[in-house]
Structure formats: C-alpha cells, structure tokens
Amino acid sequence: MRATKPAPQGDRPKGEDRPFAVVLIGTDPEPIRGGIGTAVAGYRHALIECDRFGGLVPTFQAGSTGGKLWPWLRAIPTLRRTIRRLGNDGKSVVVYGHAGPRFSLARESLMLLWARLCGARTMLQLHTPHMDRYMDKPYVRFLLRIAFWPVDRVTVLSPWWQARLAAGGFGGTVVIPNPLSRDLERVANATKANGVRPASAEGTEKQLVVLAMARLTKGKRVNLAIEALKFLPEHIVLRVAGEGPELEPLRTLAQDLGVAERVDFLGWISGAEKDRQLVEVDAFCAPSNADAFSMSMIEALSHGLPVVTVRSKAAADLVKDGQSGFVVEPNDAKAVAEAIKKLDQPSTREPMGAAAAAWVVNELSGLVVGKKIEEAASRVLARAPS
C-alpha cells in the first residue's frame, strides 16, 4: 500500500495548483439493486456537487449475464480514453475505485494499476464487511498488500473501519463515508425541514409499523426482528422487504413462533414503492452483522426513521444510541424487542427521527462528502512526481 505516510502538517495540497478531476470506477449504478451500485450513485453526486466529476467507468454490472467480465473488459479502453481526454483538457486525474470482496477487489486493483500506467493517480474505497476477518489472516493481509500496491490512498467508510485496518497493519487510510444520492439528499433535506413525520399508513396510534429491509441472507439477521415480536404487544407489526435464500426459512420461523399474521413479506422493493414504505412506517430495524456501511439504514435515517441496530462493526458510527435510534448487543432478540418497545411512544421516536435526518444531512450530503474526496485526491496529487 503506497500511501500510508501521513501528509506533512500545514502543507497546502499541491494538487490544487492544477485543475484536477476524479474518475469513478466500480459497479454500474444504473440498474441499482442495492450494495455498491447505490453507493456509487452517491459518490457521483458528491463529485458533481464539488465540481470534480471526471466521469464514471463501470467495471461491473449487477444482475447481468457476464456482468463480472464484460463490463471490466470494456472499461479498459474506456478508462484510457477518459484519462487522455481529461489530460488534454489540462487536468490531472485521480481514478477512484470502489471494491467489494475477493474478485471485486482484484478487479478494481488491476484497473487501478492500468490507471497508473495511463498516467493517473489512484484511490481505492473499501466497501466489504469481509475486510474485518481479512485482518485476522496473515496470508490474506499479504494478498491485500499486493492488491493495494497500485493504490496511492486507501479510503474506508467510517472511523471503526479505519481503526480496524490500522490494527491489521494498514495505517494511513482516510475516512470517506458513503454520500447520499441526489434523490436521497432531497428526501433528507425535506425531512429535516419538516421536522415531524406523517402518521403511519394505518392512520391510527394503535399500531406501530417496523420495517426491516435487506437482502435476506443469514448475516443480515432479520430473524432477530421476527423473534423480537414474541416479546412485543400485538399492535407492533413488522414488514420485511427483500429477497434472498433466507426468505422461506424466515416465513417458517414466523409461523413457528405464532407471529405470521404480524409479519408482512413485501419482496424486493425499489423506486416509488420503497419510498412509500419508508414514508408509511414508524421505525426501522437493522440487526445485521454483515454490513460495512448499511445503505438501507442511511435511507431510513434520511426519511426520519429511528433505527434499532446492533453493536456490530460500523453500526454505531451511523446510529447514535439514544439520539437517532438504539444500538443493542448482537444476537439478542429480547434486547431488540425492548428497543422497539421504547419507540412505541411518539414522544421518543419523533425527536429521534428528526435527529436522524439532521445527522444525515450534516454528515453525508453530497457537498460535505465531496469536499472530503476532493481533499484526499488533492493530497494524492501533491505527492505525485512532477
């Protein structure tokens, strides 16, 4: 990893002496179905907001046949042309890759090596929660050093991840959180301005509607939200949005616990339907221990929903316990239930929802995160050879 030395204190980044642009590479955000694609849309918005956007070159397309290979192959000449075009415009170029686990990381590392050969500088954003366990394996850390070799600066999503990588021997990372997309920022600003959310879809104070929204895998631990219903009064109900291999086991669990009538499985939702659900419900539950930086949680906070989550990885960096939601111990359905029960009181959840939207706007808006990217890129260019 090339850029582990801290920047000299007090130095003005020399990258500002010449105009520069940041080119994004990573998952295509257009056919978004969550994950890095959703995040990349936010990074594009952030760079546009600070006038540093140099283009987007997709290297992966979710859900498409050959999506792991053909977009990457097409990206090779496209990236070269983009770097050349910006150079002809008199701009320095930083190529900013966004990587998930395993093959995604290898793919972006090779693309960043190609960017270096084409004359650009490089940054790499880590999105995978698997990085946590990678730090515990010496041979994987060795492979990571190879993957980071063409990278001028590695960036991470939160202070928790920065500390975790430092403990594994990868110091010098920079924290750049996932920014809001343009549409989500609009929602968050409106929520912050309004202050009070509308009543739930039921139009009555007798029901508290909780939403869990995730790809339904074991690591997302949606089972905890269902199990929590055992400890909650019947007027508290759960909606589960998402698809995945755990869908049928979760349906069976709800039947076995006798709470099936209080769980509504919505399937995968997106666009207007997702927005409608986020407006209608009263609270959000995200008991996952498999997220690096939960975008569904950010969506919920942007809509002014207090969030119940667990103390796992960077969750506490997103939800301020007792302010914008509750952070409980992992794998404890009863603790999840106790937190949800506190949100049954409008006097508790409404101030939390307002605090949630305000935090999102202040910390994750496009211009705020764009300035962080701009500063990191500028310092990368400051150390570039003349």
Image (cartoon, grey):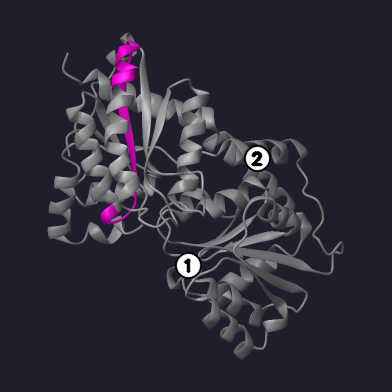
Q: Which residue is mark 1?
A: 220
Along the line of sight, the residue nearer the viewer: 163 or 34: 34
Q: Quadrant of residue 21?
A: top left
Image quadrant holding the C terminus, namely top left
Whether residue 95 is in magenta: the answer is yes
Magenta span: 84-103
Q: Which residue is mark 2?
A: 188
Q: Residue at x 58, y 70 (%)?
A: 336
Along the line of sight, the residue nearer the viewer: 379 or 101: 101
State the SS at label 1.
helix
Q: Is 236 rendered above or below residue 178?
A: below
Q: Position of residue 72 (x, y in %)?
A: 30, 44
Q: Position of residue 365 (x, y in %)?
A: 55, 34
Q: Position of residue 166 (x, y in %)?
A: 24, 46
The amino acid beneath tag 2 is Ala
Q: Position of residue 149 (x, y in %)?
A: 15, 39
